Image (spheres, rainbow, N blue to C red):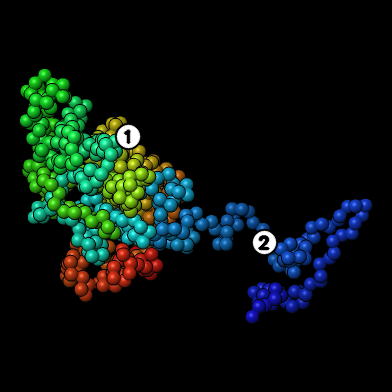
Amino acid sequence: MSRSTAELLTAFTDLTAEQLTVAAPPEIGGLDDGIVWNLDPRRGHRAHGRGWAPVDAARRLPVFRATTDQIGGLFPLLAAHGVPAVGARLGYDVSTGGSFYAHPPEWVLRKIVTNPNMMIFGKPGRGKSSTVCAFCLRMMPFGFKTLISGDRKGEYTPVLRALGIEPIALGPGSPRRLNALDLGPLRTYWPTWPLERQRRELDVILGRWNRLLLSLAAAQGHPPSVTDEYVLHAVLRRLVGADHSSDQLRPVTIPQVTGLLADPDNDLWAQTRFADRTEFTTATRALTDALSNLVTGPLAGLFDAETNFDLDWDAPIQSMDLSRLDPLGDKAMNVALTCLGMWSSMLTFLHNTTDNTANDGGGGAAGGAPRIVVRDEVWRQMGLGLRAVQAINADLRLSRSDRTIQLLIMHQPSDLHAVGAAGSHEAAIARDFLALCSTKILLGQSDAITDDLADQLGLSTTEQAAITGWAMQAQGRALWKLDNRPGMKIQTVLSATEKTIFDTDAGMRTGPRVEALTSTDTTGSPDDDLPRADTGDPTGIAGVNDSLTEES
């Protein structure tokens, strides 16, 4: 039943019925010598849409006066954070109380940020992994798939198993082998492409392989030269069959590369402008030995044979579990992360390219589902030298065309200082990563790095205080910085199910709960209430964005 304006004012104000009794508005002033007087009455014109007020609020209600600084503290006038309600609902903005949504590609399209890449910093135990898992899981209903490019601690394994996916484990005791020079889907589509496209795609792949091998050689202590780069390019073209008219490309492995470097045929050393075979082998000896170290010692059997597993590109998430490599030392882990980083970026590129061919005959933009590529502890890979840093730099710059969100995980911004000597080329490139990742997620940090935060990220004193104070008081609290916009204090909220499968502290406990989280049998485990694929949701996570019921 509708109520009149007078009834509404009586119900919601302290005005009396007598005060609400108002006379009819005066007529518009009469005409005097053609001049219209009183054109805008104090209480407006009595007509639909003309703003007439039945009550003179300025006369009958209290009037408060304040400066703009004071009036800004009134709740109805608080400004929202300005981020659209699109994408993964992660939690809430503690300054406004409103829900917070994240969708970096949409932010790019709306000119909020300049690129979709993300960088997350935080002390151990502040909720980095939980924030990453929540973001990846809740972006799946929007068509995004996730590739964990090297899970050093096996932290993402419970998430995969909760979705019915077994991670790909690499390391001692695992039968899995990964060829860092894998052709992937390129071999399937190669015969269907015209010659011009074959040359174009092969040049891209050979360039990526060359960068990978040079960065791995640098990781072994050999600084590659331009001659090394030229020779490697010739060797790779020879091995893959690009120098011969063929309908098929040949698979290439690192042992084949080192074998041809150590024992070149006459055509190879002549093509690369050496006087004889001895000069060739002498000049490339250091490069050959550096690459040979990748297939002997701790890494033997990991990257020296053909890939013997198929990456399921239709799965909502895939992970390379490197936890078995941890006992082999940091060097083995760093090399593995470098191989995986380059391998995953190349396979993502190839999948997009070949998927586009299957869908529209080879024209138009790259196809395939957009992907979130998670690079955990990326500082390890950067420590391998200039070539490794350049490889990451290339992936960040190509994220828009490759349709990926590169998500780099670090402990603190000072991790970028550890890349090369002060003033070196690699250190300068690493500093640019901050600009190539428009979205920075800053979880709790100690006071000791406050100055470093301010210097590298241009934080205000209020933002520094939020990171070293408020964000340290609970897990999942972070300051979100979108390019040069003021930081937003965001509390990530997890459901009860998410808290169970994101539990990265399980290794600190003993008892049945740890077994439940690490077992492949989920019968009766705490994550039974996670929606499965048989509910009609192909990703198996229907309703995740609406399940934010408990605070992390």
Identify the image quadrant of residue 534: bottom left
**On the image, numbered disc 2 is attached to which residue?**
64
Badge 1 marks a residue whose secondary structure is helix
Residue 382 is at least partly visible in this image: yes
- How many labels sit on residues? 2
Sequence-wise, the earlier of marks 2 and 1 is 2
Q: Mark 2: which amino acid?
A: Phe
Q: Amino acid at mark 1?
A: Ala
Name the residue rendered at 18%, 38% in the picture. 246
x%, y% of residue 387?
Answer: 24, 35
> Left or right of 407: which side holds 226?
left
Q: Residues within 10 Å of mark 2 (few under 14, many from 20)?
A: few
In the image, 303 versus 59, the foreground residue is: 303
Q: Which residue is mark 1?
A: 428
Tell me if mark 1 has few (under 14), some (14-19) or many (20+) residues whose alpha carbon lies within 10 angstroms of its own: some
Specify the quadrant of the image occupied by residue 478.
bottom left
Of the pair 115 and 190, the residue shown nearer to us: 190
Give the number of the mark in front: 2 or 1: 1
Residue nearest the observer in this picture, 165 or 479: 165
**Where is residue 468 shown, x and y percent of the image?**
37, 52
Which residue ends up furthest to the right in the rendered image?
A: 33
Which residue is at 29% across, 72% downward?
529
